[in-house]
Amino acid sequence: MADEVKELQEAILRLKQEKEAIILAHYYQRPEIQDIADFVGDSLELSRQAAETPAKVLVFCGVHFMAETAAILSPDKVVLLPDINAGCPMADMATPEAVRAKREALGDCLVVCYVNTSAAVKAESDVACTSANAVEVVGKLPREKTILFIPDRNLGLYVKRFYPDREIVLWEGYCWVHEHVTPVHVWKAKEAHPEAKVLVHPECRPEVINLADAVASTSGMLRYARESEAREFIVVTEEGLLHQLRRACPDKQFYLASPCLECPDMKKITLAKVYESLVRLEPRVEVPRSIRERAYLTVERMLGLKG
């Protein structure tokens, strides 16, 4: 099996050169996918890196909204999603029609959309955010404005901790993988590994976040683990991140808080599908110009708030 994996990886790398392509892999992808990627990172980070490369073809190993974001930022490139059915249930919890209706009901508000949304929802929003910068983005918006935060209520609740006096209306969406984790999972992991630091993604429930030594995005967890003097960590996010954590810190130990921290949509991408996608240059992800231009502005406004 190991030989078959290696042969397929080598075939993909050869084909990638022929097609003038690069491979982008999210941290939650299978290890064998991460190992052949030109870039491994979070969704927005990958899309921005892709926009800066001369490659003509982008093979996005992630889920649909991530490939859409790459298409928004790189409209002149071919964006491939090896399994077109790799979606995000949380992103699907917000539709452009529902966002428009809620915005009209609230009146004068600003819509802050988590990057984990469709291009069509981004087009209905004012500014995007990531799990790493959501607190910073909201903090730089006019204080007198009501904020409609979509679609992740847990990330929104985390942001509200920093701005208790602001009116932040939360969408009732969630990541079911992170939502699954309860304090009991963390307590049991701490019993087994009492010296371990607890790293929690802000998509988790508030009561789980309360038990964290650090609340961070995927990239933030990697940074924390590298810089920390601790030798053991309990990780409360999708299990794919463990591959990069162990590569970055081979002398440290990482334990998953729950065996159920696995996203089946992220795992739909396989080496065989990556190979077939490069052979056929399909399935492609494209964003209509009318949506892309508005969604692009939403992402650009976020970048403009930095500094």
Image (cartoon, rainbow, N blue to C red):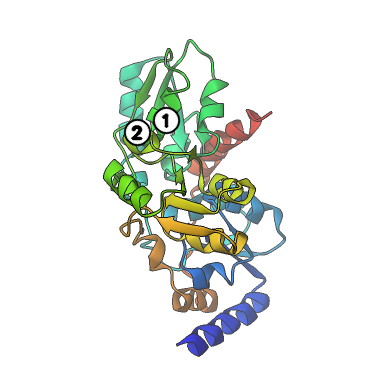
Left or right: residue 282 versus residue 187 is: right
In the shown orientation, is residue 25 left or right of residue 110? right
Q: Is residue 27 visible?
A: no
Query: Which residue is identified by label 2?
Result: 206
How many residues crowd around disc 1 within 10 Å: few (fewer than 14), some, or many (20 or more)?
A: many
Contact, mark 2 vs mark 1 (Cβ under 8 Å): yes
Q: Residue at x 30, y 50 (%)?
A: 188
Query: Looking at the picture, how far across and down is residue 32, in whole percent?
Result: 51, 73
* Coordinates of residue 54 in the picture (x, y in percent): 72, 61
- Residue occupying the point 56% across, 40% down: 296
Residue found at x 66% / y 79%: 18
Hey, which residue is sitting farthest top in the picture?
A: 144
Residue 177 vs 1, above or below: the answer is above
Q: Amino acid at mark 1?
A: Tyr
Mark 2: secondary structure: helix
Quadrant where the N terminus is found in the figure: bottom left
The mark found on residue 109 in the picture is none
* Number of numbered markers: 2
Badge 1 marks a residue whose secondary structure is helix
Vertical relation: 48 (above or below) 34? above
CA gap, disc 2 and disc 1: 7 Å
Q: Position of residue 200 (x, y in %)?
A: 44, 43
Q: Nearer the viewer, residue 183 or 2?
A: 183
Query: For mark 1, what is the residue?
Result: 158
- What residue type is disc 2 on? Pro
The quadrant of the rendering that contains the C terminus is top right
Quadrant of the rendered image containing residue 22 = bottom right
| Residue 203 seen anywhere in this rendered image of the structure | yes
